[in-house]
Image: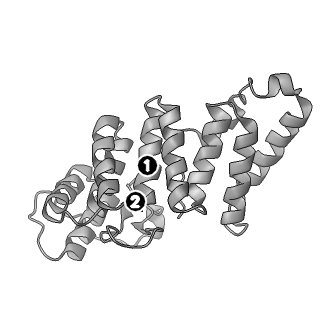
Amino acid sequence: MAAALVAAGCATGPKRAEPLSEGRDRSEQPERPTPDPEAAVEGTVEERYAQAQAFLANEQNDAARRVLTALTRERTDLSGPPTNLGILEVRAERYQAAETWLREAIKRNPDNIIARNWLAHAHRENRRPESAEAMWLEALDVDPDYVAAHVNLGRLYEEVLADLQAAVRHYRAAYEASDGTELRVLPWIARLEERLQSRSPATDSNTAVGADNASQGGSAPSQQP
C-alpha cells in the first residue's frame, strides 16, 4: 500500500494536517503514466510533492524517498517531508530511522499530530508500548478530538496493556469525536463491556483480550484526521 503523503506545508499549518492521498484502490484511480524514478525532479515544492505522490502511488518508494529527502534538507521550515519519510520507514519496519525522521517533523512543528501518530505506532511495533501510549497521549494534548489517536490508544489498551476500561473510554471518545462516523468501534465497545460485566474486579485488570481482536492488528495505525 502506498504511504499517505502528508501536506507539504504542515510546518505551520492546522493541527489537523490532511494527507494529499490516502492510497485509494487502484481501480478508482485514473490511468496515468508510470513516472521515471531516475529522472531529475524540479519545480516548486508543490510540484515536487506531486511527483513524490506519483512515485508513492506506483510503489516506487526509493524514488519518493529521494525527493522527500531533498525537500527535507532544502526546506527546514516544513515538517511534511520528514513526516512522510518517517511513514515510509515505519512501513519498511526500520523503526530507528522512522523515529529520527518523525522526531525531526515534530521538532519543526510541535502540532504535527500525524507524525506523533506514526511515531507511536513505531514504538508499539518495536515493543515499546509505554512509549507508544505516551506519544498518543501527547497527540491528544494537541488535539483532544484526534480520532486516530483515540482508536489506536484503545487498541493498545485492549491488545497489549490489558486495560479494558481505558480501551472502552478511548473507543467511545473516537466515536464521539467522529460525530458518529467511526462505526467500527461500536462492536468493540459492546464486546468489551460484556467482558467487563462478566468478570470480577479482581481479574478484570489483569486479563488481556484474546486474539479475536487481531483483525485490527498492528500493521498500520489508524490515520483518520
Vertical relation: 74 (above or below) 200: below
Type of the residue with mark 2: Ala
- Residue in the image at 61% along x and 63% along y: 145
Q: Which of marks 1 and 2 is nearer the N terminus?
A: 2
- Residue in the image at 68% along x and 50% along y: 170
Residue 77: name its quadrant.
bottom left
Query: Measured from the top left, where is residue 108 in percent x and y?
Result: 29, 60
Left or right: 13 in relation to 28: left
Left or right: 112 in relation to 188: left
Query: Measured from the top left, where is residue 199 in percent x and y?
Result: 88, 28
- The residue under label 2 is 4
**What is the C-alpha distance between the residues marked 1 and 2?**
11 Å
Let me know if residue 165 appears in the view.
yes
Query: Measured from the top left, where is residue 1 in percent x and y?
Result: 41, 51
Query: Measured from the top left, where is residue 44 in percent x and y?
Result: 17, 77
Left or right: 195 in relation to 13: right
- The residue under label 1 is 118
Q: How crowded is mark 2: few (under 14 residues within 10 Å), some or many (20 or more)?
A: many
Vertical relation: 62 (above or below) 68: above
Outermost residue to the front: 141
In-front residue for pair 207/52: 207
Q: Give the SS element for disc 1.
A: helix
- Residue in the image at 47% along x and 36% along y: 131
Q: Residues within 10 Å of mark 1 (few under 14, many from 20)?
A: many
In-front residue for pair 142/146: 142
Let me know if residue 220 appears in the view.
no
In-front residue for pair 134/72: 134
In-front residue for pair 92/206: 206
Q: Give the SS element for disc 2.
A: loop
